[in-house]
Image: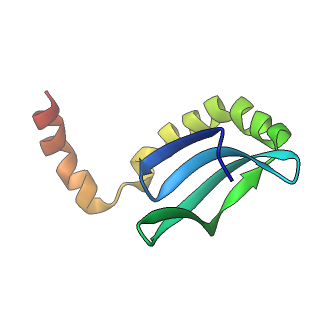
Amino acid sequence: MTNSFEKELGSERRRITVRQFKGSTLIDIREYYKKDDEWKPGSKGISLTPDQWAILAECAPEVSKAINKAKPSTLKQEDEDELPKKRKREN
């Protein structure tokens, strides 16, 4: 099986791929594992049809807004204590 598209999502372990399966196109967002020096798709993940992918892509801006809204309240206390230090280093 060859993928027509493959991109790592921040690490070798998580990837998004586009592949053909039984005559259908699927978009996989999946965790990979290494076996015999080769990365293989694992069972943890999701396969989307092109229609489902279109819905996901359409709502991506709204999801991004929700993520940005949620960020301050989801920070751990230790992360909040580090924020001023991190901001100083960034400037």
Residue at the image point whose x is 86% and y is 46% from the top:
24
On the rendered structure, is 90 left or right of 24?
left
- Image quadrant in which you'd find residue 49: top right
User: Does 65 appear above or below 3?
Assistant: above
Report the front residue among 88 and 39.
39
Q: Residue 26 placed where, x, y %?
A: 77, 47
- The image's colour scheme reads rainbow
User: Does 65 appear above or below 86?
Assistant: above
**Which residue is the extreme one toward the right?**
23
Report the front residue among 54 and 34.
34
Q: Residue 13 placed where, x, y %?
A: 46, 59
Say which quadrant the C terminus sits in. Answer: top left
On the rendered structure, is 8 left or right of 57?
left
On the rendered structure, is 31 left or right of 45?
left
Q: Residue 88 placed where, x, y %?
A: 11, 35
Residue at the image point whose x is 26% and y is 52% from the top:
80
- Report how many numbered discs are placed on residues in the image: 0
Residue at the image point whose x is 81% and y is 38% from the top:
50
Q: Residue 4 placed where, x, y %?
A: 66, 38
- Image quadrant in which you'd find residue 44: bottom right
Residue at the image point whose x is 56% and y is 35% from the top:
64
User: Does 28 appear above or below 45?
Assistant: above
